[in-house]
Image (cartoon, helix red, strand yellow):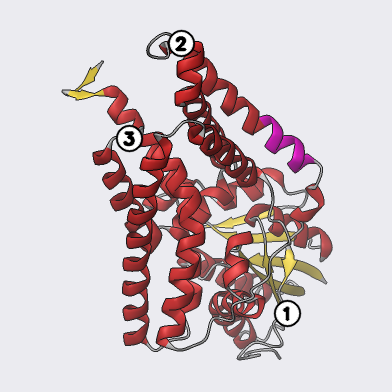
Amino acid sequence: MYTLLIAVDGSEGSRRAVDHVVRLAAAGLPVAVHVLNVQIPVESGHVRMFIEAERIEGYYREEGLAALDPACAVLAGAGLAPSRHLAVGHVTETILHYAEKLRADQIVLGSNGGASLRHRLLGSVASDVAARASVPVTLVR
Amino acid sequence: MDFLGIDSSFLLAVGQIIMIDILLGGDNAVVIALACRRLPEAQRRQAIFWGVAGAIGVRIALIFFALQLLALPYLKLVGAALLIWIGVKLLLPEDDDGHANLAASDSLLGAIRTVVLADVVMSLDNVIAVAGAAKGDIALVVFGILISVPIIVWGSRFVLRLMDRFPVVITLGGALLGWIAGEMAITDRVMRESFFADAVPGVVKYAAAATGALLVVLVGKWLASRQLATREPVEIPLDAGPSSGHKP
């Protein structure tokens, strides 16, 4: 088994990353697929003072499932059995942490190609991960 | 110095205020979003509108008092100390104290109450910082309040992403608060009257500001290095979620 970690955020790039994994599996690679969504922490001491923990967690879960469910539906439709993971933390750090924890052989990420304003201002998580990962990283354009 | 006919120190203050709003306004945005998200669409808009209106009102009232108070002797020193503390807190990872003691109810009024109460608490740091950066210029204060509104309403996601991608933004923000604090402390009436004949010389002002900035960064970094372990990602269990969807 070849363990793949796909990090998804609900974007077009994530969709292409999932499609890429489907193609790999269709080509005969025996894969174990993990799908991860990372939520950026929203809570500071102040936020916790006014909003209960369950409500914050509910928010993370809702946002996370919105990214995870479509990806897992596509993978399941292709006959794969993806495991879902949702975590809150620094995006790049968290992806690397899970790659290690799940002993992933490879990380697959969508890259949005640098056209958007957000990308220009914030740079790309994908290239950050690629620069720091200790396993191969596939950026799907 | 002039830039396109506008005084450059004015522009500098404007830049400082925008930065403060971005750094200290994110919390408000999150509380508004979370307190209102279970309401039906129409009520949610209403709650957000009144919540933001409350935020502006609270800010105007607080800033008005802050400006009056800062003219009194010693109070700029107090304000400076508070700002240093706010700056240091900004640099620390999330502390685990304080859990919600006000259950945000899922009614319209409950949501508005949560948002406005949160505004009172959370605007305090923003108000002290803006009052310090504006140096008594009421036009700047009004500008600071106006510019903070869109940031509170729409900016939170962008701010969160920005801080996730570039943690150095937070360090710079802490340094900025320390800078304002240093300037504030040295221009307190007591300091001015006891150490300087007339106005505080520019060099001294900058030296004090730089000292404040350095103080915040050094203390913040030192304290943060002592509690590094809190940075681990937190796993959110999916089973309790609304759908366990497409698990095979």
The answer, for residue B147, to whether it is visible in the render is yes
Which quadrant of the rendered structure holds the C terminus of chain B?
bottom right
Q: Position of residue A105 (x, y in %)?
A: 79, 60
Which quadrant of the rendered structure holds the N terminus of chain B?
top left
Could you tell me the amino acid type at mark 3?
Gly
**Mark number displayed over residue B237:** 1
- Mark 2–mark 1 Cα distance, whole angstroms, equals 61 Å
The residue carrying pointer 2 sits among few (fewer than 14), some (14 to 19) or many (20 or more) residues within 10 Å by Cα, namely few
Identify the mark nearer the N-term, 2 or 1. Answer: 2
Q: Position of residue B170 (x, y in %)?
A: 57, 42
Q: Position of residue A127 (x, y in %)?
A: 59, 47
Mark 1 and mark 2 in contact (Cβ < 8 Å)?
no
Give, as a single range, the part of the protein colored magenta.
B218-225
Could you tell me the amino acid type at mark 2?
Phe
**Mark number displayed over residue B196:** 2
In the depicted structure, whether residue B181 falls above or below residue B246? above
| B160, A29: nearer the viewer | B160
In the shown orientation, is residue B107 left or right of residue A37?
left
Residue indicated by mark 3: B136
| B121, B215: nearer the viewer | B121
- Mark 1–mark 3 Cα distance, whole angstroms, equals 50 Å
The answer, for residue A44, to whether it is visible in the render is no
In the depicted structure, whether residue B167 falls above or below residue B1? below
Q: Position of residue B62 (x, y in %)?
A: 39, 53
Query: How many labels, in total?
Result: 3
